[in-house]
Amino acid sequence: MLHPVGTGHYLVLSLALLLVGILGVLTRRNLVIVLMSVELILNAVNINLIAFSKHTGNLAGQVFAIFVITLAVAEAAVGLGLLIALFRNRETTSADEVNLLRW
Amino acid sequence: MVDAGMVWLALLFPLLGAAALLAVGRRLPKLVIAGIACGAVAASFAVAVAAREARGEAILGPWLPLVQADWGLLADPLSVRMMLIITGIGTLIHLYAAVYMAGDGGYYRFFGYMNLFVFFMLLLVLANNYALLFAGWEGVGLASYLLIGYYFDRPAAGAAAIKAFLTNRVGDAAFLLGMFLLYSLTGTLRFTALTGTEAVPGLGLATLLLLAGACGKSAQFPLHVWLPDAMEGPTPVSALIHAATMVTAGVYLLARSSLLFALTPESALIAAWIGAMTAFLGATVAVVQTDIKRLLAWSTVSQLGFMFMAAGAGAHQAALFHLTTHAFFKALLFLGAGSVIHALHGEQDLRKMGGLARRMPATFFTMFVGAAALAGVPGFAGFFSKDEILHALFESSGPLFITGLVAAILTALYSTRLVRMVFGGPPAEERELHQPPRLMTAILAVLAGGSFVAGWAGMGRFHMAIAMASVVCVAVGWLLGRRSLDLDGPLYEPFRRHWYIDELYQRWIVQGLARRGGAWLSRFDAGAVDGAVNATGAMGRVAGAFSAWWDAAVVDGIVRNCGFLIKDLSYPVRLIQTGQVQTYGIMILAGVILLTSYLVFGGRL
């Protein structure tokens, strides 16, 4: 017996995406995967914003989601740029090996 | 008429003159310099003439409150008389010097010092207390030093200046001690307050010390050695300072202290005998001198001895009378000698002179008057003053009187010899003469007039018997002087060598000091001076070592330990900075969870 898809489902989906994203950011060694996981987190936030926008009938959430997508594009561009620069210098994309900034 | 309150004007002019000349004189033309210098002294003379009847004290202001000595001037017959002599003779000598020194460099310096001298000399005689008198006393010593050493490029002049200064210093030290003693005995240094002094124990010592001071300034035995050497100065200086005025300061001091000496007859007797010794010694040495200025210098020593004899015998009026006449005729003789030296292009040796009577008649005539006055030829000034002195000695003590007569014979002898060797006989050397300018001759004439008139003007009671004896002395001296010009015998050896006194001082004091003092100085240098330097160095090294240790141990220690402390304390904190981005991510997440939990559940936990 199927329930109709409601706000709760979106929130669960959003939460799942968020957790997957966080897990990816914190545990994956490859920085490309880490960047991808950051995208997951941002999209989890987007789903959340839109779900609440539909639930309350306030369009501000949807507008905000558009802004987040724009920001994500910029973030991906800068992140990948940094990653390429890192790779050119260190021949690595492993988060473990990027640990110069410490005492 | 000027009263006592205005006498300070006489001091003002020479002081201003000296200040102006020494400050800006270098740039002034010679005529202006001479004008300032002569004008200042002449103005002083005018004040002195106007103030000749002034009597009384004028306090200008406080000076040394500790000994109650003020800037005070005292005008009484004694000081006014001295003031007239100093400024009167001083004016003539300044005028003479204006011509005589025209060819010398440092004209302004010469006249600056001369005016300075006149100022200090007037301060000396016008002071109303011993302390201010001493200030003038030291001032004239300074001026004398500067003027003896005027030709500073001549080593002899420098040495003579130092000798004069140091010899005077011996006397000055005694004077100072005498002054201290006098103050402690009587509680005052003011002349007018000292009149009521009574004979207290110790007063004799005080007067003896004052006498020693007078001996230094007036070139009395045993401190007479500086005066003949002082002839290294220019001739007008010899005339003004070392014949007419400064050297009479000692006689003035005795006259000023006459009441104190009256209370201490022993000191007065010592003064008389010092005078007698000096009169005899100076006259004997003068007899064999071959340098015209040195002959006159030794004659001055001898004549000052006469004054001391008189002052010591209590005849202060006679001493002052002789001081006055001597000022005239000795200034005359010195300035005449200056004319002769000038004419002979700087020649001072008597043996190279002669036959000048016809060629320099004016100088001859005036110097003849001066020599006659010095010898005591009847009618001339020296006759009257010496007559009074001899009379006083006759009444006081036989031996003193005899010494006085012998010195009088010798005086006539060397006076005759002086005139004969300069003016008489055949010319020793034929050469062109530098005729003295008319102003110089005119000044000589004025002084010659003074040398003649001063005796008649000051004549007191006339003593026939003494006068006869004195005439006999002059005649004997004249005869001896006529006969023997060439004094070469062994008899004269002690005279020629100044009774060995200079050699004695040289051997015992100067060389002794030089040798032993040199050794001592060397030890002092090696021990004290080097020691001080080395000790300073060593202390510096110790301080440096300590400073280095302090720096390394304490300062660096503090700094480094601060660092270590912070480093050690920060160790646990440092551990969380791994450089791993993901570790930071976990921490951020943990922080977010904690904060969120607090915000959500905070109120209930």
Image: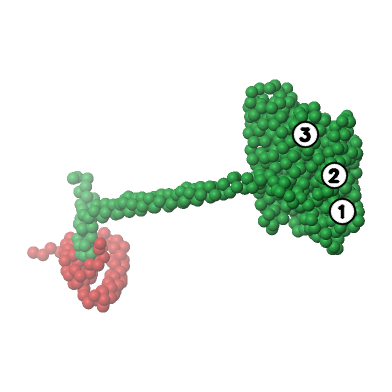
Whether labels 1 and 2 belong to a single chain: the reply is: yes
**Quarter containing the C terminus of chain B:** top left
Q: Secondary structure at mark 3?
A: helix
**Quarter containing the N terminus of chain B:** top right
Chain B: drawing colour: green
Residue B78 percent across, percent down from the top left: 80, 33
Chain A: drawing colour: red
Instruction: Report, in whole angstroms, how far the alpha carbon at label 2 lies from the one at label 3.
Output: 18 Å
Horizontal arrangement in the rendering, residue B227 relative to residue B436 (left or right): left
Which numbered disc flags the more N-terminal residue, 2 or 3?
Answer: 3
Say whether marks 2 and 3 touch (CB < 8 Å): no
Q: Is residue B215 above or below residue B192?
A: below
- Residue found 47% across the figure and 47% down from its top: B528
Q: Which residue is mark 2?
A: B478
Residue B267 falls in which quadrant of the image?
top right
Query: Mark 2 is on which residue type?
Result: Trp
Q: Secondary structure at mark 2?
A: helix
- Residue found 78% across the figure and 39% down from its top: B407
Residue B149 percent across, percent down from the top left: 70, 52
Query: Mark 1 is on which residue type?
Result: Gly
Residue B142 percent across, percent down from the top left: 69, 45
Whether labels 3 and 1 belong to a single chain: the reply is: yes
- Residue found 70% across the figure and 42% down from its top: B224
Which numbered disc flags the more N-terminal residue, 3 or 1?
Answer: 3
Q: Which residue is mark 3?
A: B402
The chain ID associated with circle 3 is: B
Say whether marks 3 and 1 touch (CB < 8 Å): no
Q: Dot 2: within a 10 Å radius of its alpha carbon, few (fewer than 14), some, or many (20 or more) residues?
A: many
Query: Mark 3 is on which residue type?
Result: Ile
